[in-house]
Amino acid sequence: MRRALLIAILLTASVAMAAKSLSSATGGEVPLYANQKRAVNEKAVYTATSTETFIEVKRAGGMTQVRTKDGQELWTDSKLLKEFSAATGANMDLGSGKIEGYLDNPQAVYILQEESNAMGGISLERSFVDAIQGNMDREGTEYRNGENN
C-alpha cells in the first residue's frame, strides 16, 4: 500500500514538473475567459498583467487553458502566450530609457525618479574624514572585542 502511494505521489510530481510556465507573448495584458468557446461580446473574467506567469493545463484548437497564481483555471487565445523562461530576464519600458536584464538572486528592486519630492538631498554639517580609521589589524580588533579567543 505504501509503495503504491509513493508511486502515485512521484507520478503526480513528475506531471506537475512537466507543466509549462507561460507568460504574455505581446508584452501586454492577457484576457482570460471562463469557457473555451465564448460568446461574441463576452467580457474577460480576469485580465492578467504582462508580467504574470501561468501554468499550462491543456490546449484545444487555438485556445489554451491556464492556471493562474490563485488557482483558477481559465481560457485564453494561444497566440497571446509564449513559454516563460526565467533565464531570459525581463524588459521594462521606462519611457525614454530601457533597462534589460535579469537578477541572479531575486530580491526587491526599486527604481526611483529623481524628480520625486521624496528624494530630497542631504546636507552634511561636518566632515567625516577624521572619523575614518586607517589600516586595521584584524587580530588586534578581534582581541579588543573578545572575539576568536
Image: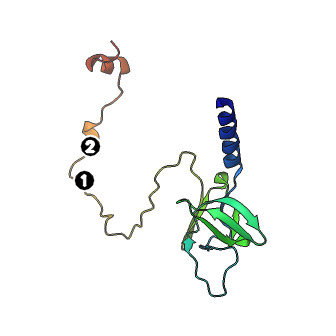
Identify the residue position indicated by label 2 in the image: 128
Please tell me which residue is depicted at 56% across the width and 73% down the height of the picture.
Answer: 47
114 relative to 68 in the view: left or right: left
Residue at the far front in the pictured view: 1
Residue at the far top in the pictured view: 149
Identify the residue position indicated by label 1 in the image: 124
The answer to which of 147 and 52 lies nearer the viewer is: 52
Residue kind at label 1, given as amino acid type: Leu
Q: Quadrant of the C terminus?
A: top left
Crowd rating for badge 1 (residues with CA inside 10 Å; few <14, some 14–19, many 20+): few
Residue kind at label 2, given as amino acid type: Phe
The local secondary structure at tag 2 comes to loop
Q: CA distance from mark 1 to mark 2?
A: 9 Å
The local secondary structure at tag 1 comes to loop
Please tell me which residue is depicted at 62% across the width and 87% down the height of the picture.
Answer: 41
CB under 8 Å between callouts 1 and 2? yes
Rendering colour mode: rainbow
The answer to which of 145 and 80 lies nearer the viewer is: 80
Task: Give residue 58's quadrant in the image.
Answer: bottom right
Please tell me which residue is depicted at 66% across the width and 31% down the height of the picture.
Answer: 1
Task: Give residue 93's quadrant in the image.
Answer: bottom right
Q: Position of residue 15 (x, y in %)?
A: 70, 47
Q: Position of residue 7 (x, y in %)?
A: 70, 36
